[in-house]
Image (spheres, helix red, strand yellow):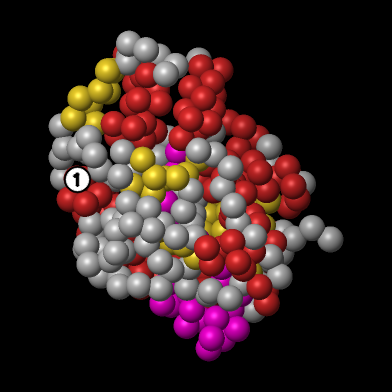
């Protein structure tokens, strides 16, 4: 029998595509989408949808019991750039929502959790190139602190209460279906929109700032593979490094110029530059490969083609 799934934060950048992918796999009626606000037409129409505030334990519990939910994907979060503006709101949302879901599992009301962590768990003292799974972690952003703390709690709930929680440290995610909101890596999505609209883009990160990135299709596939893996193979219960690709604003611009030759880029770094400077440039994800056979498919060229084609088809 297919598992009954609840996605919290289903209207966001990852949630939207994850919901559609899981509905296709598990059947529309088995995947309940929820968010604090309404989302894309397709998401709302294709299966059950509930309004849930992720910080409201009772609201989540009611939906879990009503639909007899087995698995929860907690995708609601305040991302790095926004959380720097609203530190306490970011901390409260990111931590309260996680505890709500961990406690539901501790009380055996659900049996499996997916919770995303991020490259933001790393900080300026972390080795920048090919950052290992186990290394120095001194995050300097509110978002990074909340994700690192969350990882510790996930591992704690697994060790102490046997909670089957699984997690990935997502790199910057690039997609054309739903816009990202409030992250430092958002430039790598905006640039494609602007390339098609105006043939120019002003990057809020400097020319040579390399960050780990991934096309959304790869991220969704990784998420579902990890959730489908045998529990015994999921050896890391804090969060798995996930690498994908690494590029700079100059390199992504160059890949766009191959398809739109008169595209131009200039640079006006803002407060997000300091956040990016504190993060790794590339990630070693060999543990994900060893434990659940992970391998990314999209390189920069393939992603640029997919992004431009996807965006053109939408207009
Ligand atoms: N994409 C996220 C951000 O920029 C990183 O997890 O905040």
> Residue sitting at 68 percent across and 48 percent down?
22
**Which residue lies under the disc numbered 1?**
273
Q: Is residue 309 above or below residue 60?
A: above
- Viewer-proximal residue, 90 or 221? 221
Task: Classify residue 4 by image quadrant.
Answer: bottom right
Task: Classify residue 166 by image quadrant.
Answer: bottom right
> Residue sitting at 35 percent across and 25 percent down?
254
- At mark 1, the secondary structure is helix
On the image, the x and y values in percent for residue 235 come to 58, 76
Residue 33 lies left or right of residue 210; in this view the side is right
Magenta residue check for 164: yes
- Viewer-proximal residue, 43 or 121? 121
Where does the magenta region start and end? 151-175
Residue 51 lies left or right of residue 226; in this view the side is left
Q: Is residue 271 above or below residue 147?
A: above
Disc 1 within 8 angstroms of ligand 1 (CB): no
Residue 71 lies left or right of residue 305; in this view the side is right
On the image, the x and y values in percent for residue 75 come to 49, 54
- Viewer-proximal residue, 83 or 41? 83
> Residue sitting at 64 percent across and 79 percent down?
108
Q: Is residue 292 visible?
A: yes
On the image, the x and y values in percent for residue 24 come to 73, 42
Q: Quadrant of the N terminus?
A: bottom right
Magenta residue check for 260: no
Name of the residue lying farthest toward the front: 129
Q: Residues within 10 Å of mark 1 (few under 14, many from 20)?
A: some
């Amino acid at each position: 029998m297919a598992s009954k799934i609840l996605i919290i934060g289903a209207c966001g950048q990852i949630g939207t595509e994850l919901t559609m992918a899981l509905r296709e796999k598990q059947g529309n009626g088995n995947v309940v989408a929820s968010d604090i606000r309404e989302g894309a037409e397709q998401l709302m129409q294709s299966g059950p949808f509930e309004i849930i505030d992720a910080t409201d334990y009772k609201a989540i519990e009611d939906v879990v019991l009503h639909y007899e939910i087995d698995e929860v994907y907690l995708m609601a979060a305040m991302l790095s750039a926004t959380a720097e503006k609203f530190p306490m709101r970011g901390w409260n949302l990111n931590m309260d929502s996680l505890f709500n879901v961990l406690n539901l599992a501790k009380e055996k009301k659900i049996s499996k959790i997916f919770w995303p962590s991020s490259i933001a768990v790393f900080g300026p003292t972390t080795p920048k190139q090919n950052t290992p799974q186990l290394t120095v972690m001194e995050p300097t952003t509110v978002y990074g602190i909340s994700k690192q703390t969350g990882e510790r709690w996930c591992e704690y709930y697994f060790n102490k209460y046997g909670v089957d929680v699984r997690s990935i440290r997502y790199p910057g995610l690039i997609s054309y279906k739903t816009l990202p909101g409030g992250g430092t890596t958002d430039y790598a999505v905006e640039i494609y929109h602007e390339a098609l609209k105006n043939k120019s883009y002003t990057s809020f990160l400097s020319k040579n700032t390399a960050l780990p990135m991934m096309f959304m299709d790869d991220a969704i596939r990784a998420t579902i593979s990890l959730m489908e893996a045998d529990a015994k193979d999921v050896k890391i219960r804090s969060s798995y490094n996930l690498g994908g690709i690494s590029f700079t604003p100059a390199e992504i611009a160059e890949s766009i110029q191959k398809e739109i030759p008169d595209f131009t880029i200039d640079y006006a770094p803002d407060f997000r530059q300091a956040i990016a400077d504190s993060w790794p440039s590339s990630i070693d994800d060999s543990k994900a490969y060893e434990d659940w056979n992970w391998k990314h498919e999209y390189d920069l060229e393939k992603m640029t083609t997919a992004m431009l084609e996807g965006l053109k088809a939408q207009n």
